[in-house]
Amino acid sequence: MTKENQFTEIHQVTYYETDLTGQVTLAMLVDMAVLASYDQAEALGVGTQTMLKQGLGWVITQYEMQIIRLPRDREQLSITTEAVSNDRYFANRQFFVRDIDGNLLVHIKAVYVVMDLMARKMIAIPEAIIAPYQAPNVKRIPRLARPQKITTDETLITNDYHVRYFDLDTNHHVNNARYFDWLLDPLGEDFLTNHRLQHVTIRFENEVRYGHTITSAVTTPQIVDGAIATKHRIMGNDEAKDQTYAEAELTWLVAETVDEPV
Amino acid sequence: MTKENQFTEIHQVTYYETDLTGQVTLAMLVDMAVLASYDQAEALGVGTQTMLKQGLGWVITQYEMQIIRLPRDREQLSITTEAVSNDRYFANRQFFVRDIDGNLLVHIKAVYVVMDLMARKMIAIPEAIIAPYQAPNVKRIPRLARPQKITTDETLITNDYHVRYFDLDTNHHVNNARYFDWLLDPLGEDFLTNHRLQHVTIRFENEVRYGHTITSAVTTPQIVDGAIATKHRIMGNDEAKDQTYAEAELTWLVAETVDEPV
């Protein structure tokens, strides 16, 4: 099953990667997945330091996730990342998070682009940093599902969040994973402890910067095709409400029983 | 060197446990230390689940930390926790965070108490849950250094923080470690990237609850005995400013060079 463009590592879940239900948070799940892609890059000699020396960094613009169940505190996971294919500007990557018996828990698809960190703009992917992955070069990578946009007639729950020092990563950018905490928090404890996440699509549109205050808006949960759906928008606050930083669409199932922590 | 009341585990630092300088955040450092004490409890058959079944939980009321240097991204650490001694109500515990060569990086002293989770009050430590640690039972444990209080004439930098869903732990309490992010954030990127933490004393006075908004107040940094000192208070916001949740005192050194991530 091992392919040249795949990389697998073991990760033991800690309590501080989980929420009050003892399940891994979406932000930490994404952090763990991205860690595997960093480690693959290191192993191939095209890690973060090599990229930084050229003033470059990978940025994730989109995710699509299928969640069978979220990993739990103390669980040992195998996390596989695979460089699927790439075109001139975009690289498709997927992740498989499995339990110790090899059962698939989460499948994530992602779109990566290369940023010129000084100019803060996207560039064509340099051959030298993509070739080591041995993924097929294609004319145009398949696009991921796009989240449905919130329409003007929908009722919204909103909350404001100030970007904090500890939200910043070594590129002085807000870590993408932090958006998931902002997305979910307005739904509140009652909803979040009584529902389990099933599917996520998210698109990152613009960069949130240090010192910004953002508004996280979410539609009141609605039944769509038998599933509970929420649509999300991370936007500027007050007079900057036209600015969209990210849009997402999540589907949920009622959590019939709260899982016992293992 | 191994004592019966000691427990050591290895921890590999991940990028998402570090800040933009590539050093472990104070919140994550405390999370890692507490993980070692949880794992010691599990190994001794008095882990979280055993405690929960009796409606009990350990709560940390005070820390004192000496920081030689903070661990860095990808570094492999050995974390030793030791049950030092206990009296009727308080248990003294210490932690040694060492690098792969055995050099001490951080020394932490902590005071633990047992909470009745339903009544939300402190109780005498039950013999059955403390005996397995084989720490000496003393008349009165040594007290830790107390943070200096902020005086009314001092200039303060303040910021408000709303308690979020993901700040809660499995006891539905705010994870103690979250206080460190609130404490430090008002100091801002310029101060935080140009100073390195040397010493911390913190006392947790009252429990912050979900839905609360707190104010984190910090004195403008001052030179005290040759070190740069900041005094901190986490308090209620607006009309609840009399409420103190935690007080802390930190000392800093100027970071002469920014460390290269390893």
Image: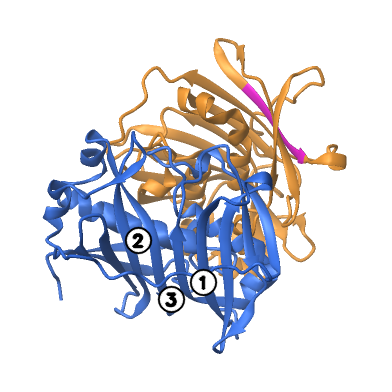
Chain colours: A orange, B blue
Q: Nearer the viewer, residue B85 or B122?
A: B122
Q: Nearer the viewer, residue A90 or B124?
A: B124
Residue type at tag 1: Gln
Query: What is the secondary structure assignment of the residue under circle 2?
Result: helix
Residue beneath label 2, please? B33
Instruction: Check the residue under mark 2 and report the chain it is in.
Output: B
Residue beneath label 1, please? B148
Residue type at tag 2: Ala
Instruction: Check the residue under mark 1 and report the chain it is in.
Output: B
Residue B152 locus on image (x, y percent): 66, 67
The quadrant in which the N terminus of chain B is found is bottom left
A206 vs B49, left or right, is right
Q: CA distance from mark 3 to mark 1?
A: 19 Å
Q: Nearer the viewer, residue A161 or B139?
A: B139
Q: Which residues are magenta?
A: A230-235
Is A205 rendered above or below residue A221? below
Q: Are marks 2 and 3 on the same chain?
A: yes
User: Is residue A232 part of the magenta span, yes or no?
Assistant: yes
User: Which one is closest to the eye, mark 3 or mark 1?
Assistant: 1
Residue beneath label 3, please? B67
Q: Tag 3 or tag 2, which sits nearer the N-term?
A: 2
